[in-house]
C-alpha cells in the first residue's frame, strides 16, 4: 500500500466484507524483531536503537495487508476481496 493509513482502510474494508486479515497489521509487535526491546542482546547488537536498525522493514510492514488464501477457499472470496479493495484503492 502507499501508506499506513491506506493499509488500515483496506483492512477495515476487508473486515466489513467478512474477510480476515490474519496477523497484519495487528500483530506486528509480536512477530517483528524491531519491537523486541525485551531482548537485551538484540538491542545491544543494534546500538540500542531498534527503530533505526529495522526502519525499512517497519515501513514495509506498516503498509502491508495480509490477504486470506486458503486451500478450500469459498468461491465468493476473490470477488469479495476485489470489492473490499476496490472501495479503498479506486
Image (cartoon, rainbow, N blue to C red):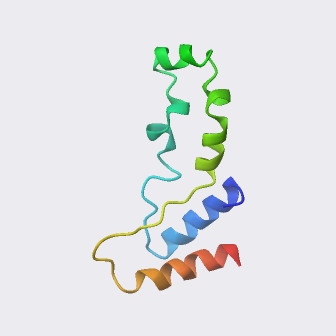
The image quadrant of residue 13 is bottom right
Depth check: give the residue in front, 83 or 41: 41
The image quadrant of residue 84 is bottom right
Count of all numbered marks drawn on residues in the image = 0
Q: Residue 18 location, x and y as percent? A: 43, 73
**Quick check: 23 left or right of 7?**
left
Instruction: Please name the residue shown 51% across and 77% down the image.
Output: 81
Instruction: Please name the residue shown 55% across and 81% down the image.
Output: 82
Taking 60 as reference, is 48 above or below it?
Answer: above
Instruction: Please name the residue shown 55% across and 32% down the image.
Output: 34
Instruction: Please name the residue shown 63% across and 54% down the image.
Output: 63
The image quadrant of residue 65 is bottom right
Q: Residue 47 location, x and y as percent? A: 62, 15
Q: Quadrant of the C terminus?
A: bottom right
**Quick check: 76 left or right of 8?**
left
Outermost residue, left side: 72
Q: Residue 43 location, x and y as percent? A: 54, 18
Q: Residue 48 location, x and y as percent? A: 61, 16
Q: Quadrant of the N terminus?
A: bottom right
Amino acid at each position: 500500500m502507499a501508506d499506513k493509513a491506506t493499509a488500515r482502510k483496506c483492512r477495515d474494508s476487508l473486515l466489513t466484507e467478512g474477510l480476515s486479515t490474519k496477523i497484519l497489521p495487528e500483530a506486528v509487535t509480536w512477530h517483528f524483531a524491531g519491537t523486541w526491546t525485551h531482548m537485551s542482546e538484540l538491542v545491544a547488537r543494534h546500538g540500542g536503537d531498534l527503530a533505526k536498525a529495522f526502519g525499512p522493514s517497519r515501513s514495509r510492514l506498516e503498509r502491508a495487508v495480509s490477504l486470506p488464501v486458503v486451500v478450500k477457499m469459498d468461491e465468493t472470496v476473490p470477488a469479495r476481496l476485489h470489492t473490499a479493495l476496490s472501495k479503498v484503492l479506486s
